[in-house]
Image (cartoon, rainbow, N blue to C red):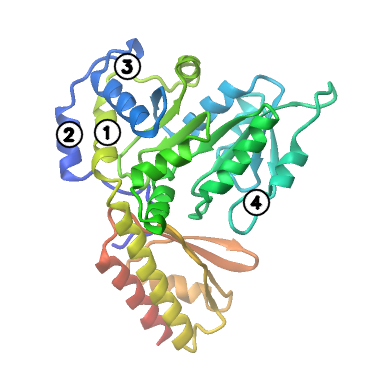
Amino acid sequence: MPDFRSDTVTQPTAAMRQTMLAAPLGDDVFGDDPSVNALQDHAAQLLGFEAALFAPTGTQTNLIALMGHCQRGDEAIVGQSWHTYRWEAGGMAVLGSIQPQPVETQPDGTLKLADIAAAIKPDDPHFARTRLVVLENTTGGQVLPTPYIAEVAGLARGRGLAMHLDGARLFNAATANAQANGSDVYDEARAICKHFDSVSLCLSKGLGAPVGSLLLGRHDFLRQARRTRKILGGAMRQAGVLAAAGHYALEHHVRRMADDHALLRQLADGLHAAQRTQPALQGRLEVHAAQTNILFTEVAPDIAPAFMDALARGGVRVTSSLYGGQTRLRWVTHLDVGPADVRAALDCIQAFAG
């Protein structure tokens, strides 16, 4: 069944499972799980940081970072649509006592520099203390240009603020940049990361590991992060069986992300063609621009139920939500989506329109 719901649905490959089975284990709470330590050391070196910390989820690594940069009553500037603000259950406020200061996200996924600057509070007891600027890359599949990130970092540094990146799909952004620049994906990832004090990297999305995320930063920051992870219940024992999967993914599943992007372009091209040529879809199907492995389409209300039913009958799985009176579908390509899945989805749409 073609499953375009998310890149979180991937299954470990046979080679990854063998790596997990053979992983040497210890007790990570004591700091002596060799597979966890190897993953952390490898990731830190790979992305240009002093240290890294393995945790169960990206929600947790983001929260650990926020609680490391901000104290009770401090404030973090976030995007209105960022995961750290909208999709992580309000953890920064509920558990961190950190005030989020949301800034409107622009259509290209950026935050206006003027809006960030205007959101920074003066040093006055009437206001929460602004301590941190958070960015997200990719965001809704859109890539934040690295020169733009450098501008935001310059603004933050000039105002004495730290920078955190929710880089759940960091390597998707790096892949897009590498394709555009004719450069190496790992070099592009490091070029993004160098502007941040901390980065959260998800291993269980496009990288295809079953569980886990990494928080990267300075040694002293990560020492406190380890304590915060314990407070949040994220310290695990023989976690090396999971860390080994993440380590394998960083070594073997990064360069193949270009395949996911290519498949998404095929899907988008097919949807565009159907929208142009099929009278049943003209003016009723909108296909958004896509840069990485995520594509959004809008389906008009008069055809949405039948359209979704056609996909379901064909076994095509996709996430949907109501947006502006229309049904918005999110299509995500990943490790377990192949050319046959794209063809099956387009065949379903062709049959519906015909």
Q: Secondary structure at mark 4?
A: loop
Closer to the chain start, of discs 1 and 4, is 4
Contact (Cβ within 8 Å) of mark 1 with mark 2: yes
Q: Residue at x 29, y 20 (%)?
A: 37
Taking 339 as reference, is 116 above or below it?
Answer: above
Closer to the chain start, of discs 3 and 2, is 2
| Residue underneath mark 4 | 105
Q: Point out which mark residue 28 bears.
A: 3
| Residue underneath mark 2 | 19
> What is the C-alpha distance between the residues marked 4 and 2?
41 Å
Counting other residues with Cα less than 10 Å from the Cα at mark 4, is it few (<14), some (14-19), or many (20 or more)? some
Q: Residue at x 29, y 29 (%)?
A: 243
Nearer to us in this view, 284 or 172 = 172
> What is the C-alpha distance between the residues marked 3 and 1?
16 Å
> What is the C-alpha distance between the residues marked 3 and 2?
18 Å
61 vs 263, left or right, is right
Closer to the chain start, of discs 1 and 2, is 2
The percent position of residue 68, horizontal first and vertical second, equals: 56, 21
Number of the front mark, 1 or 2: 1
Closer to the chain start, of discs 4 and 2, is 2
The percent position of residue 30, horizontal first and vertical second, equals: 33, 10
Amino acid beneath label 1? His
**Where, by quadrant of the figure, is residue 248 drawn?**
top left
Taking 22 as reference, is 311 above or below it?
Answer: below
Amino acid beneath label 4? Thr
